[in-house]
Image: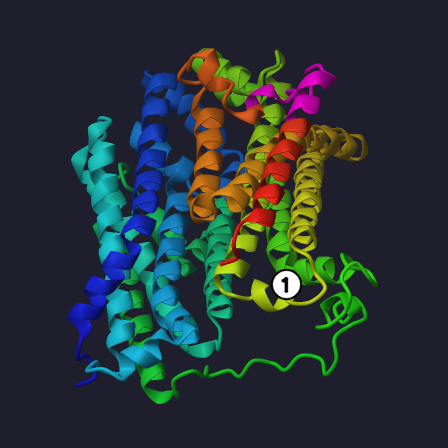
């Protein structure tokens, strides 16, 4: 039978994913619940919410960034703020789950072993889709319960949870298709994430067009369907039908393609590379038998690290530029939109400077710094991925030392982090400068403000480096946990009036608030020294421990 062994494979997938899925559930539920709670505190009266909604409705940049606004209730504002991002998060989770249990296991040779037992040909794909579907439904339930817990209407909360689950199901089906098309897990994930990015752009275009433009573009996107459910603003239950139909259709296509292709191949054959490596990748440092310390021992590993990480870096940098440009374009009219009271004070606390416009721009730079910390952590943890996949072993068998291998990836992480921050600052400068009539000066000003976040971002990534060298099994969880702590403190610390000792745990608390604030040298020096010390500890541990 084609589905023989489905139950056993589903239980195996649940066991493997149980720890990975818990953070997704927590983050998505906490993001929406915290946003709803924050709006309740900031806008307790209907008049303030109506004024905010009016300002958002007339700002295409904010609509493009977060999605359409369907009302001025607390729930509707919460959905506008993070609803589309949460739908994209559920979609990402589904993509990772499906690709991991299909193309990823096939690439690692596990599906060949499973196929030699009493399991059907389609059972692994069906188990992956069932696992993603169960996770999506769990997200929908947890989000609904969390929103009800913070005082949102039950019907709207259930509609929101089902909308997020529906978006996740669509992209589970999309990942099932890309896993058959591509011959590598990395390519399958990239294709599915590319489709997700295109869908988000269509949602943004439809939201920014408003009622007078081509708003129908947003209806072409599964992310757009999630926000068009209009949770807390009418609850259009019928909009849940298109994602369900799309999920079933895409899953069926994936099943048909899986039945037609051979194990270990993709429908699109990978393009062959060059016959010979370039001069940097083919240097003596990568030739077996070459004497250690001779002939550019760092150039070839650095070129290899750049080749492995350049795609991710360009994606992070492009995203930072576009998001910061859209966010900063709203700075010029921020005062009239938020008015006075608690919202103004919240922006001032987050931005850390007195002028509202400068505080708003400084808050965007803090968020860019947190995102750069995420990129740097991801780039550092590529070392652990190379080690666990045993790709580091043949490299270290050549003239490349452990220090040279690690430093090559760290160099890309540092340079990429700086490039991403410069792109974020340039985007903010363009977005704000075009509205203010002075883009040239604002680009330089905001680029400098963004680069001031570099020491803090590297200090966060330094935790991952130290764990990789000293406690490698804890490096992935610990590295992302350190970033999560910084994000929670950065976003919610000033708003919830956390004690100063807790705020001081985040490196971003000590970064100068630019533009508009002073630039003390001592905190930047201490943060830089901390990042160097953590990296040195990680390298020292790497020299003494076993690889793998």
Q: Decide if residue 245 is in sight here.
A: no
- Magenta segment: does it hold 515? yes
| Location of residue 20 with respect to 57 vertically, above or below | below
Instruction: Name the residue at 39% across, 88% down.
Output: 262
Instruction: Name the residue at 71% across, 31% down.
Output: 446
Instruction: Name the residue at 63% across, 22% down.
Output: 511
| In the foreground, 347 or 277 | 277
Q: Position of residue 478 (x, y in %)?
A: 44, 40
Q: How many numbered badges does the structure rendering display?
A: 1
Q: Which residues are magenta?
A: 509-527
| In the foreground, 444 or 530 | 530
Instruction: Name the residue at 70% across, 33% down.
Output: 451
| In the foreground, 128 or 210 | 128
- Magenta segment: does it hold 99? no
| Location of residue 475 with respect to 314 vertically, above or below | above
Colouring: rainbow
Say whether residue 8 is left or right of residue 515: left
| In the foreground, 362 or 19 | 19
- Residue on which the image places disc 1: 396
Q: Position of residue 436 (x, y in %)?
A: 71, 28
Quadrant in which the N terminus appears: bottom left
Within 10 Å of the Cα at label 1, are there few (<14), some (14-19), or many (20+) other Cα atoms?
some
Q: Secondary structure at mark 1?
A: helix
Q: Position of residue 271 (x, y in %)?
A: 61, 81
Q: Residue furthest right?
A: 295
| Location of residue 161 with respect to 534 vertically, above or below | below
Q: Position of residue 386 (x, y in %)?
A: 54, 60
Q: Decide if residue 461 is in sight here.
A: yes
Q: Quadrant of residue 465?
A: top right
């Amino acid at each position: 039978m084609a589905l023989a062994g489905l139950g056993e494979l589903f239980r195996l997938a649940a066991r493997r994913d149980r720890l990975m899925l818990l953070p997704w559930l927590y983050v998505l539920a906490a993001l929406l619940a915290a946003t709803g709670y924050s709006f309740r505190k900031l806008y307790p009266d209907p008049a303030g919410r109506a004024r905010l909604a009016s300002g958002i409705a007339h700002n295409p940049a904010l609509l493009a960034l977060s999605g359409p606004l369907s009302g001025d209730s607390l729930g509707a504002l919460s959905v506008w703020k993070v609803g589309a991002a949460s739908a994209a998060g559920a979609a990402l989770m589904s993509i990772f789950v499906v690709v991991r249990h299909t193309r990823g296991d096939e690439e690692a040779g596990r599906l060949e072993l499973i196929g030699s037992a009493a399991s059907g040909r389609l059972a692994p794909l069906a188990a992956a889709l069932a696992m993603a579907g169960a996770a999506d439904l769990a997200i929908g339930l947890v989000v609904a319960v969390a929103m009800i817990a913070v005082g949102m209407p039950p019907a709207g909360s259930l509609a929101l949870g089902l909308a997020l689950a529906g978006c996740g199901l669509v992209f589970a089906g999309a990942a099932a298709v890309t896993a058959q098309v591509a011959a590598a897990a990395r390519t399958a994930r990239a294709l599915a994430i590319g489709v997700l990015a295109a869908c988000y752009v269509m949602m943004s275009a439809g939201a920014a067009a408003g009622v007078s433009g081509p708003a129908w573009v947003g209806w072409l996107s599964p992310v757009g369907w999630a926000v068009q459910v209009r949770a807390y603003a009418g609850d259009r239950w019928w909009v849940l039908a298109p994602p369900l139909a799309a999920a079933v259709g895409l899953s069926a296509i994936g099943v048909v393609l899986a039945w037609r292709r051979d194990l270990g191949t993709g429908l699109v054959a990978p393009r062959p590379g060059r016959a010979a490596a370039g001069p940097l990748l083919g240097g003596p440092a990568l030739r077996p038998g070459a004497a250690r310390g001779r002939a550019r021992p760092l150039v070839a590993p650095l070129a290899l690290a750049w080749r492995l990480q350049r795609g991710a870096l360009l994606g992070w940098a492009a995203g930072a530029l576009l998001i910061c440009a859209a966010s900063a374009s709203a700075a010029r009219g921020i005062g009239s939109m938020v008015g006075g009271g608690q919202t103004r004070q919240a922006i001032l606390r987050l931005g850390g400077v007195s002028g509202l416009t400068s505080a708003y721009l400084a808050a965007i730079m803090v968020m860019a710094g947190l995102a750069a910390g995420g990129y740097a952590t991801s780039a550092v943890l590529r070392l652990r991925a190379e080690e666990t996949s045993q790709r580091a072993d043949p490299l270290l068998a050549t003239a490349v030392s452990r220090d040279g291998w690690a430093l090559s990836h760290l160099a890309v992480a540092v340079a990429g982090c700086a490039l991403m921050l410069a792109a974020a600052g340039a985007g903010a400068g363009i977005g704000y400068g075009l509205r203010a009539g002075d883009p040239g000066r604002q680009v330089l000003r905001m680029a400098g403000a963004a680069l001031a976040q570099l020491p803090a971002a590297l200090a966060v990534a330094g935790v991952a480096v130290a764990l990789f060298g000293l406690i490698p099994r804890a490096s992935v969880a610990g590295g992302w946990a350190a970033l999560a702590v910084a994000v929670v403190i950065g976003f919610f610390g000033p708003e919830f009036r956390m004690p100063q000792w807790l705020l001081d745990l985040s490196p971003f608390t000590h970064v100068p608030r630019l533009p508009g604030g002073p630039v003390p040298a001592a905190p930047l020096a201490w943060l830089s020294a901390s990042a160097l010390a953590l990296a040195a500890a990680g390298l020292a541990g790497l020299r003494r421990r076993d690889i793998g």
